Every structure is written in C-alpha cells, then in structure tokens.
Amino acid sequence: MTIPDKSGRLNRFLDLVRKKFSFSRGGFFTSDPSWGSPASAGTPDWLYVLGLTLTGAALFFYHLGAPGLMDPDEGRYAEIAREMLLLKDWVTPQLNFLPYLEKPPLVYWLTALSFQAFGLTEGAARLPAAASALAGVLLLYFLGKTLWNPQTGFRSALILATSGGYVILGRLIILDMPLTLFLSLGIVLGYLAYIREQRPLLFWAYLALALALLIKGPVALMLAALVWGIWTLLDRRHPLTFWLHPLGLAILALLALPWFVLMSMKYPGFLRFFLGEQHVGRYVAGSIHKNPFYYYVPVLFGLMLPWGWLLPWSLGRLRQAGARGHRLFLLIWAGVILLFFTISGGKLAPYILPALPPLALLLGEGLASLADSEGRSPGFTISLLIWALSGTVLVAAYIWPPASLAPRLDKAALLQPYLLTYLVIFALAPSLAWLWRKPAWLFVGALLLGLLVSPGMERLGRTRSPREIGLTLRSQWRPGAALVGVRLYSQGLSFYARQPFHLWEFPTELDFGRKLRPDCGFFFSTPAEMTAFAASRPMVFFFLKKQNYPGLKEGLPGKFEPLADWKDCILAAYTGK
C-alpha cells in the first residue's frame, strides 16, 4: 500500500503561496542589505515568532472573557453584533433594534461571526480586538526585521505588546485596535512599495486601507495619505503620483464603497449624518469628548507605560544622531497621528493608538543600539534613574499616603493587591537594569506588568459591568414583560438581558435611528405615556437612578420590588395594581 506524500504536497503548496505573495526581492517583509541592515544568522525566525505568539496569548487572551462587558463601548458593540445575528441583517447595524450608523460595520461583522462560532460570551465579543492586538505585534516584528534585523524587530514587538494601554485596549471590544492593525499594515506596505520601488505592493496596501475604512470611516485614508504625502515631499525619491495605483484604488472602491452606497440609498440623510455630524462635525467642533490641547501628552505617556519613560531619551537620541531614512518615516508616521488628533476638537485616549507601533519601533531600534555598548548611554542611564526614582516615590506614597492622596487610594482599593505589586515591579525593573547594565530587565518587568492587567481588569469589571444585574433580569423575565429605562440607558444591560429598552425620552445615541424609524414604539414623550404602557404589561422592569426611585413609586401606583442595584442605579420589578 502506497502512502501519499503529504509533506511533499504541503511543501509544493507553500512554495506556490510564497511565489504568489512575493515580488522581485523576496516577500513583503524580507530584509534587503541594499537598504537595511543585514539580518544576523543567530536565533531562527520561527523562534522569535513563537515567543511573541506565546507572549501575546498570555497578554491578550488569558481570561479574556472573565470581566463582564463594560459600558458604554463594550456593551454597545456587543449588542449591535447580537442584534445583527438575531435579525440576520448583515447590512444595517442596529442598536436597540434601530439603525445605528455612526460607524461602518466591519467590527460588528467580525464580532457577530465570533458570536456565531463561540456563542454570546464575553470572550467571543472581545476576540476580534485580541486577535488584532496579537497580529499587530507580529506585524511589528516583521517590519523591524525588514528595516533593521530580527533582534530589533523582536525588541520593538515586545515593547508594543507590553505597553499598558496596548494590553488594555487589546482586551476590550473597541474599534481602535482593529483600525490600528489595518491602518498600520496599509502604511507599512505603502512604505515598502516606495523604498523598494515595488508598486504591486500598493495593491495590498490599499486592500488593508479598505478594511480600515470599513472599521472607522475616512479617517483611515486621511491618515495614510498624510503619512505617505509628507514622507514623499521630504524624501523626493518619487513624485506624489507614485501613490496613484489603479488596481489599488479599484480594490479600495470595490470593497469599501458598496456599504456606503447602500446606506445612502436606504437612508437619504445618511451621508450628512455620517460625514457631516459624526466625522467632520466631531473633528472640527468637538461637540463631545472635549479635552485640552495638551491632552495627548500625558495620554501617550500612559498608553506606553512603562516604556513611556524612555520616549524622551529615544527622541533625543534621534535629534542628536539625525532622523533619516526609516527613522524619519517612523517619526512622520507617529507625528501625523498625534498632531492630527491633537488639532481635533474632540479627543479620546484610544484615538492615538495607531501612533504606538512606530514609536515602539523607534524605542526598539534605540535599545538595540545599546547592545554593543552594554547599556552605557548617559541619556539612557538618566532615563532609568528618573524612572526608578519615580517608581520608588509612588511605592512610598502608596504605603504612606499623604492626606491629599488617601481618598483616591480608597477608590482604588478594588485593585488590591495588584496595584502595590504593579508599583513595586515598576520601580524594580529600571533599578535592576541600571545596576546590572542589562536592558533585558526592562522587558522582564514590562512583561510582568502586562500580566497584571488581566486580574486588574477582572476586578474593575465588578463595578463597571452590568453583567450581574443583567443576569438577574434574565432570570426574572416572563412573557409579555418589558424593560423601561427612566432617563437611563445601558447597552450592556440590553446585551445580558437579551431585551431592548423602552425609554422615557432623553437624548441618546439612538436619536438618529429614531428619526429613521419614528414609529418604533420604544420611546415615551411624557410620564403619562410611560404610565399607560406600564399598565398594559403584566410586568415591567424599571432601570433608573436610585435617587429617582421614590418619585417613580409615588407617580405610578402598584407594586414595586427592588431586584438588584449597580453603582447608583437600581432595577425594580413593577406588577401594577
């Protein structure tokens, strides 16, 4: 009996894939000594990839579903995906069974597919973000390897993977993590096409940008165009027309435009709302999320903790040595994103997440330069000492808190004992790196700090998530019942209860959907309408602020039974007279 040569078939298949996805000088991410440092022949590539994959699995996937979904963002995006799956409507995102058109649908599609495969669980809801975070780490490794060498790529990827903000956002349902992945991939492939003079790579760059566009809208194209355009004007190797790739633009239009066209045909006011209000309006006027001009300085430092302490050294090093070539491009990449959102009227911390990959590469390249000098760099040493001293002060302030700090520590009591452990490691890592002159201690400390994020988020979820109150509601539900929010709305409660909200009228993100479906029956304009609705149901579950509960009982005769509370809110069952 002849045994088929499966390994031979597999090798032939892999060879075919390599040929298909590679161009004249190797693949997307192959080092070329003519424009980058040659790769060393030390640790094999697969070992770096395996190490990063295992690290990412521990940081992004371990106990991913343990914390309850947190309002507002996690509850909102999970509920949209649940309704998409329930209604089998994969075209129009809906929230509370009303059109929700503030963002394009790709993340909702991915979340709904994850629900379909793994069930309506917290882990399934967060899976697209966690997978995007891990993919972003591996992308950074291959880019660092391509621009310099595997060791630089590995250090850069570890810096990104262990940056506190990156770990947290990789464990939450958030649009910005998948956006960061595809935007970074598009920018990187475009840069490689430019420096290698391999214009076919632009097709894949535009494909990645099309996916980024379907995640958060035209901001992805604007950022990529600014990065590419500024780089081209400074480098002058090619004209700006280099980026006009017909097939790339065609794939961008083919993938991204149909959804926007469909929504415009179905809802005539869609483009005005989507572009005018949700993108241009928010950016220019900053009607929501108003923050000061300097907002992103501390936010960037916080997102990159603990590595944020080395950013001044890294940028100062570039100023002394001269920012040229790859370093200049990375500075442009990070600078465009930071400046673009700094100018914006509305600011949120996750907006600048796409700036972390290029900054991690710059830090990784800077740390790689210390290898030959055994960490002996005056600027680096000063940074370590400041980092260690700051950590020591924080530990002391935690153990012997001054009177002004005590109330804030009381609020953080939920994070015990992880907060003290975090601060101790935070102070020890730079101290050991300075004493032994081994930057490797920084990576050990950062990894340990990253591993503390998961249990810390689990504890935080106890107060930030409506999971318990939602499960209580589901256990008490009966046919014909209704959920009413009295000037209060929780998307997470909807997800856990598997029920829509009826709302006593007040401004919400459902306003545009309500205009599109004015006869939806989910809103009450007056207390009398709400009273009549409650009288028509065998049971009504009221969700409201505790301070409003006595007034509701006085104005609505009948039997009330408090079921659960969450923060300053209460869930009560009403059964009429």
Image (cartoon, rainbow, N blue to C red):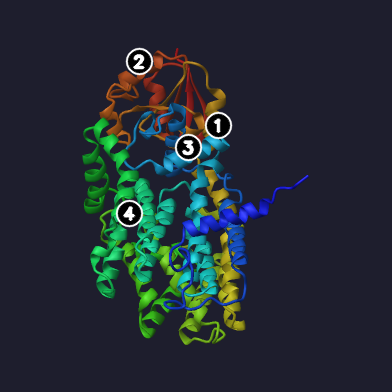
Residue holding disc 2: 532
- Judge left or right: residue 274 versus residue 133: left
Amino acid type at image mark 4: Gly
- Looking at the image, which residue is at 57% across and 58% down? 56
Question: Is tag 2's residue or tag 4's residue first in the polypeptide sequence?
Answer: 4
Of marks 4 and 3, the one in the foreground: 4
Amino acid type at image mark 2: Ala
Task: Find the distance from the CA under tag 2 to the CA under tag 4.
Answer: 58 Å
Task: Find the distance from the CA under tag 1 to the CA under tag 2.
Answer: 27 Å
As drawn, the label of residue 112 is: 3
Secondary structure at numbered mark 2: helix
Question: Is tag 1's residue or tag 2's residue first in the polypeptide sequence?
Answer: 1
Question: Is tag 4's residue or tag 1's residue first in the polypeptide sequence?
Answer: 4
Amino acid type at image mark 1: Leu
Task: Find the distance from the CA under tag 4 to the CA under tag 3.
Answer: 28 Å
The image shows residue 461 at horizontal and vertical percentages of 53, 46
Residue holding disc 1: 471
Amino acid type at image mark 3: Ala
Task: Find the distance from the CA under tag 1 to the CA under tag 3.
Answer: 21 Å
Residue holding disc 4: 248
Secondary structure at numbered mark 1: helix
Question: Is tag 1's residue or tag 3's residue first in the polypeptide sequence?
Answer: 3
Are the residues flagged by discs 1 and 2 in contact, CB closer than 8 Å? no
